[in-house]
Amino acid sequence: RRGGDNSPGTFFNKGKNMQHVLNLSENFDVYADANQWILTKARNNDAEARTVLGYVGGTKTTLLRLCREKSVVVWPISMDAINEWPERFLDWKKGLSDDVAKRH
């Protein structure tokens, strides 16, 4: 399916307010917007064309469960990075804001 709703399984259209967060492995990435992490997979090994596998606005535990359910490969170095994140998305997002404020 292709559409503008960006529901799971749809073609991923990166919006202006979305940012790439983490490369999980060769074909899997995490993006984020103001409300959630967005788990994506490359379409036909094309880094620019993405399929949404799911949205997680709660906890990294939920994000990791979604990774397992969707058979997402997570490299050890990526897992190390996730382990450093706060548990909740909102705390993770707040940490980004705090980091930006410290640099200015």
Image (tube, grey):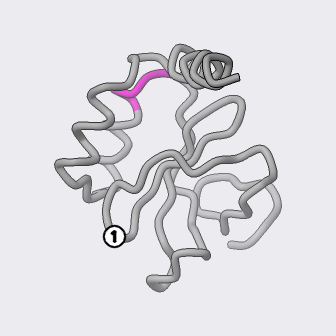
Q: Is residue 99 left or right of residue 34?
A: left
Amino acid bearing label 1? Glu
Question: Height in image: 42 above or below 79?
Answer: below
The reply to whether the magenta stretch includes residue 44 is no
**Secondary structure that dominates the magenta span:** helix
Front residue (pair 97, 85): 97
Locate residue 50: give its quadrant. Answer: bottom right
Q: Is residue 9 left or right of residue 18?
A: left
Q: Is residue 56 left or right of residue 7?
A: left
| Residue segment shown in magenta | 58-62
Q: Count the marks.
A: 1
Q: Position of residue 10 (x, y in %)?
A: 65, 64
Front residue (pair 97, 47): 97
Q: Residues within 10 Å of mark 1 (few under 14, many from 20)?
A: few
Q: Residue at x 78, y 44 (%)?
A: 17
Q: Is residue 27 left or right of residue 79?
A: right
